[in-house]
Image (tube, rainbow, N blue to C red):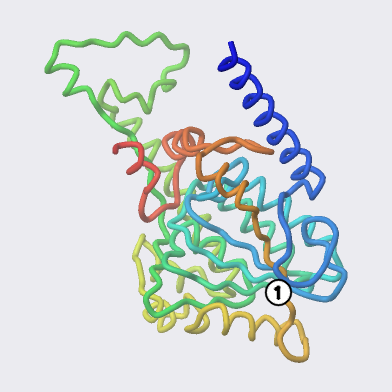
Amino acid sequence: MERNQFLLFLSFLFSTIATILGIAILVSGSSLARFSSGTGGSLFQASEIGAVVLPIVGEIHSGESTFDSTGADTVLRQLRELDEDTNVKGILIEINSPGGTVAASQEIFNELLHLRKSKKIVVSMKDVAASGGYYIAAASDYIFAENGTITGSIGVISFAPNVKGLLDRYGVGVRTYKAGKYKDMYSPFRDSTNEEDDMIGKQLQDTYRKFVEDVAKGRNKTVKSIEELAEGKIYSGEDAFRNKLVDDIGGRREAHKKLSELCQYEGLIPLFEQEYSPFERMIRSLGVKFLGEGSQTSKIRALLQSQVLVILPTALGKLML
């Protein structure tokens, strides 16, 4: 009896603590974010002139960001808040991403091009800023990469697993009911037809052409010059600099200095960096949905169902483990 009462008391205590923590987090700000420098009220509304650090990390996909991926909806919301904040003069985008889905990368690219009319944007590439990661970088005013950065990979890929041979081996059949000749075009249970291969190829070529054209537009280059560097080729940061895919070699220090210069700020412009509490880091690392959509499952589903701009499909690797 006493043991049950003790367990009941512990349950009540933990519930109370969890409730208090939840209320504190919600009151502290809808983004669960705080600034590492400067002061301010909401997400990016600083009370002094400055610039904001915006990370693009992991796979790029539609929906909300997770702790190890970038959701277009989250980024677009942040960029639109920045657009309305006259105290924010520039954005330092730090990219460490192998790419992601086409539409998500395009949405962020287009929003950055719009924002570039009123803010200065500088990119600092980390380990990888390839394919969809490079797509986003191309919308900036200036790009820095480290010598060892992997970048480029201007190309499109689409995955379609085929387990027909495996099923045939064990005598397993799959019946498919459909309305529409091509409804099961990506089915893993049968071989594709030549007609379907042609349709998919055309779709990929259309997306690839748009990718090349957007990079040329963002970088103020000719389409022909970008075509020569595209075709899915990957580059080290040094090689990308030689081929003018990036503007200079350097990291955050150099990017910060360049952004200050573009913003015509005397000295180094204050950087406002979004930080998360240890509690939210734990929640996100566990893959729990919190204040928004976004999970490994939805991320992988998006990669499997969409054309992707990606150099290393790490999410698919996690799925196969």
Reply above or below: 272 against 282: below
Q: Position of residue 249 (x, y in %)?
A: 47, 84
Quadrant that contains the C terminus = top left
Q: Position of residue 234 (x, y in %)?
A: 35, 66
Tell me which residue sits at (53%, 55%) in the image. 210
Question: Horizontally, is 242 left or right of 63 in the view?
Answer: left
Name which residue type carries label 1. Leu
Quadrant that contains the N terminus = top right
Tell me which residue sits at (69%, 38%) in the image. 291
Disc 1 marks which residue?
Answer: 271
Question: Horizontally, is 274 left or right of 96 in the view?
Answer: right
Question: Horizontally, is 197 left or right of 99 in the view?
Answer: left
Label 1 Cα crowd, 10 Å radius (few <14 / some 14-19 / many 20+): many
Q: Secondary structure at mark 1?
A: strand
* Extreme-bottom residue of the structure: 266
From the viewer's side, name the closer residue of 128 and 269. 269
Reply above or below: 268 against 212: below
* Extreme-front residue of the structure: 2
Reply above or below: 162 against 66: above
Q: Position of residue 194 (x, y in %)?
A: 28, 32
Question: Horizontally, is 195 left or right of 216 in the view?
Answer: left
Residue 186 quadrant: top left
From the viewer's side, name the closer residue of 306 and 1. 1
